[in-house]
Image (spheres, helix red, strand yellow):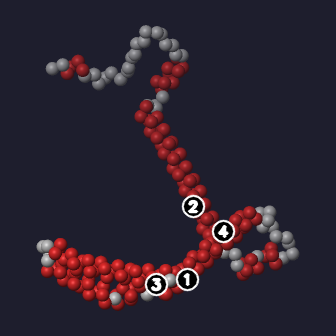
Amino acid sequence: MGQGTSQIPPSSTQHVFASETPVRFSQEVLDALQASPETDSTRAKDLELHIQSRVASELSRLEAEQSRALRELEEQISATPDSTTESSHPSSQSGFPDQSSSFGGKDQKAKAEGDKMRDLGRESVQKEIEELRKKLGQRKIREDIVGDKGVEKSKQEMVKCLRINDRRPLDCWQEVEAFKKEVGRLEKDFLGKVLD
């Protein structure tokens, strides 16, 4: 039902386009196009392979650049100026002038400044840690709270009441208020110790 007219006979491989305006190509161009083994699919495949190879080479170049930059940063971080490594350089022991000022002198200065900053940061952190340890050693807060009999007694009474009245917790308002008073007293005592 209508299928016969929509099917293309398999023997027709030539496409002929008729245009309203005459288009003229030289016979050499027409012969070159007809003799060319390339098709649209092979050109597309070639283009895709070319793009993939360019992307792969660019990625490998970027990876190498990043690994080089990472190595340089690791070397800068790990480099520490100490007297044993500086005295073992042959340029400092020989009679020749130090060439580090002309080759990489800026890098050496940057490394030294970075090392100083890291050492200062480390020292300041250590000082702060020691200060905090001293402050915490002076305060024995946990022992004061656990050792307070009034808070423990009011807490136990409140818990006991809440367990008995598990369906009616509002009946324990007196025990809750007593607990709040004891905690408030303990807070006042604590603030008095801290602020003094």
Read off the residue under disc 4.
Answer: 114
**Separation of marks 1 and 2 at Cα, in angstroms:** 39 Å
From this view, report whether residue 69 is shown above or below residue 83: above
Mark 4 or mark 3, earlier in chain: 4
Amino acid at the residue labelled 4 = Gly
Of marks 1 and 2, the one in the foreground: 1
Read off the residue under disc 3.
Answer: 193
Occupied quadrant, residue 117: bottom right
Residue at x 46% of width, y 31% of height: 37
SS for dot 3: helix
From this view, report whether residue 112 is shown above or below residue 191: above
**Separation of marks 4 and 3 at Cα, in angstroms:** 43 Å
Judged left or right of residue 177, residue 66 is right
- Where is residue 156 drawn, in percent x and y? 23, 85
Amino acid at the residue labelled 3 = Lys
Mark 3 or mark 1, earlier in chain: 1
Do the CB atoms of the residues marked 1 and 2 lie less than 8 Å apart?
no
Mark 1 or mark 2, earlier in chain: 2
**Separation of marks 2 and 4 at Cα, in angstroms:** 21 Å
